Image (cartoon, rainbow, N blue to C red):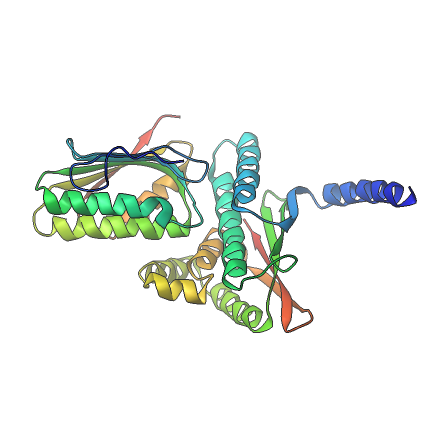
Amino acid sequence: MTTSLSTLRSLASLRDFFSSERILICFNGPISRTLISEIGTALKEHIESTRECTTAAMDVFSVYIEISQNIRHYSARNDYVEPESTATVVIAESGDGHYIVSAGNVVEYADGEALQERIAALTALDKTELKALYKQQLRQPRSEGSTSGAGLGLIEVARKSTAPLLCSLDRLEAGRAFFTLRATI
Amino acid sequence: MTQTSGHSGAGADLILAPTQSTPSVAADWRSGRLEMAGESYPENTYEIFDGIISWVQTFLELTDRPLRLELQLSYLNTSSIRAMIDIFDRLEHFVHSGRDISVLWLYNNRNPRSAELGEEFKEDYTFEFDIVAIPD
């Protein structure tokens, strides 16, 4: 009984945390394609209802979809099963009219390092350079894109972002790491 | 989930009902029209686009009639954008040999991102590509 009581108390403090961090929607667990769609639709409708124009809603939705699908594809390609295949996704308001999409997942440490390098390279580019890279990547043979992964989607996320992408890599056991990406829209 | 009338071969129409992550598709062989409407962000684009690409390819190869595309796509994920390029590249190929092909891109006034998406496609092709706003 004490366990369930403390669970309830921590739920209340979790709720306080969500509120103080202006979190709109968050998710932690095994993520399915249906769930991605459901969460995304709820998110889009919520933002649309607060704005005159759908631009913000579409940009947040786009970033959220690309990041979530990248995680799903990566996890499938590496034959991950739970708990490695789970994702942590948080969508919050920044307080100054922006939205923040953060997502984390388990990766092979070397892949995480490569991803950090790619993101660093993207943050050095302005919008015009990002568009040129995007157009170039669109024309790459599909097989090439799927083996390297997170190519076009990541460029799209950078294009929709209003601030440089932030990422971090926390080492785990067995040559793995927890990779986190944060995009401000 | 999807319904196809007839076979995907010559002379057949292609009708796909929309799902949460795929648009509605109506390809009419007799009138030479392909309509797509809605959002497209399936995890695996081949599920929907392979059929559309093969319909377009078959129509262009087996007839010499005009082809009209009417697209009202409010959102495409990057893999759907790549798949649309596969379609547009085929159109461009046939336009070079004098084929009458045009694209009408419709977007909702409240969704300027859809107009920008259309513009980014348009700038890479030479065929007629009209971008028209429709009232909310």
In the picture shown, does residue B47 fall above or below A134? Answer: above
Between B77 and A120, the residue placed more toward the observer is B77
Q: How many marks?
A: 0
In the picture shown, does residue A141 fall above or below B13? Answer: below
* Quadrant in the picture for the C terminus of chain B: top left
Instruction: Give the x, y percent position of residue A177.
Output: 64, 68
Q: Is residue B123 visible?
A: no
Measuring 60% from the left and 54% from the top, which residue is drawn there? A103
Residue closest to the far right: A2
Instruction: Give the x, y percent position of residue A135.
Output: 33, 58
Instruction: Give the x, y percent position of residue A72.
Output: 53, 54
Between A155 and B88, the residue placed more toward the observer is B88
Instruction: Give the x, y percent position of residue A99.
Output: 59, 46
Specify whether B46 is left or right of A55.
left
Between A105 and B100, the residue placed more toward the observer is A105
Specify whether B37 is left or right of A157.
left
Measuring 88% from the left and 45% from the top, which residue is drawn there? A3
Q: Is residue B35 visible?
A: yes
* Quadrant in the picture for the N terminus of chain B: top left
Specify whether B123 is left or right of A157.
left
Between A130 and A145, the residue placed more toward the observer is A145
Residue closest to the far top: B135
Image quadrant in which you'd find residue A127? bottom left
Measuring 41% from the left and 62% from the top, which residue is drawn there? A146
In the picture shown, does residue B31 fall above or below B42? Answer: above
Measuring 86% from the left and 42% from the top, which residue is drawn there? A4
Image quadrant in which you'd find residue A155? bottom left
